Each structure stands twice: as structure tokens, then as C-alpha cells.
Image (cartoon, rainbow, N blue to C red):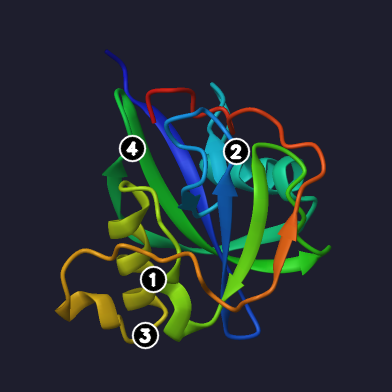
Amino acid sequence: MTERLVVGGAVWAEGRLLAARRSAPPELAGRWELPGGKVEPGEAPESALMRELTEELGIETLPMARVPGQWPVGAGRTLQVWVVSLLAGKPEPLQDHDEVRWLEPDAIWDVDWLPGDVPAVRETLRVLRLPDPAATATAPTATAAATAPTVTATDPAAGRGAGPAQ
């Protein structure tokens, strides 16, 4: 089976990390991720990330640095993450998500991250030189009770293209 590359954006602005809650497929719905999606054949990963963030959240971004590493996120899928600057727009869950939330550094583990995103978020924190309080605890289990602002979709779309196997 050929590996399919999935890109995620660690959108970092005003000292906060953007997280997006999946609306589909059912086995992923309600869990949080670094927003992004599949790289299309012949597409550069950075271009795919900018396209996906525009389609899914209505924002213009610029990938600044690739987070070292890559992580399996389902059968035949590998996640790569970039730290991303927000250039324009206010993130809204237009497609594939039903909520977005800006997380302060001390609230990053207050959401229920998808399993494949947990190591990517940890590495992102290292790259951003932020402390990871979950690093000394057991795996984060999010309570989803963060007080950070949220945005809710009025018409959640199905799956960010990750499909049921992510």
C-alpha cells in the first residue's frame, strides 16, 4: 500500500495554538486535531496545507517551518506538521469540523486530541519552545472543558478527506 501524506498546520497566533474538532467520520467526530488534510498528487505539501486551511477554515496562512518528524494517522496515512503564520481571516469551521478553538499554552491538553496528533502536538510544543505539562504525566486525556473561545459551524461537513482510516 502506498503511503498518503496528510499535512497539519500548527497555526500559532498571539501566543495561542489553533485546534479544530472533527465532525466526521463517526469514529473521529468530536476529537481534536491540528487542521489540514491530504496532499493531492503533484502538489507540494506546503501548498496543500495552505489550500486545506483556506477550504476548511477560511484563513490565509504561510507555512514557516516544518516540525521534525512524521506520524502515522491511520492505514496508509502519514502526518507531517508545519508551524503556520496566520496572514488573514478569522478561523471558522467551514468544512470537516464543527468547532475551532484557540488554546493558550496551559490549555493545550484540555481537548481530546486524535491519537495521531498527540505526538505531533508534543513536537510542535518543543519547536515553539513551550513547556509540555503532559510530558511528565500519562498520555493526555482531555476534558474538553477549556475556556478558550470557540466557533461552532452551522452546517458541519463530512470528514476532512481523512476518511474512516485516519
Instruction: Bin the neighbour count of mark 4 within 10 Å (Cα to Cα): few under 14, some 14-19, many 20 and up.
Output: many
Q: Amino acid at mark 1?
A: Trp
Residue hosting label 3: 129
User: What is the secondary structure assignment of the residue under circle 2?
Assistant: loop
Residue 41 position by quadrant:
top right
Residue 23 spot, x, y in % from top left: 60, 38
Q: Quadrant of the C terminus?
A: top left
Residue hosting label 2: 23
Name the residue at 46% across, 79% down.
107
Disc on res. 109: 1
Residue 30 spot, x, y in % from top left: 51, 46
Instruction: Bin the neighbour count of mark 3 within 10 Å (Cα to Cα): few under 14, some 14-19, many 20 and up.
Output: few
In this picture, is 121 found above or below 45? below
Q: CA distance from mark 3 to mark 4?
A: 24 Å
Q: Which of pointers 1 and 2 lies earlier in the amino acid sequence?
A: 2
Question: Do the CB atoms of the residues marked 3 and 1 lie less than 8 Å apart?
Answer: no
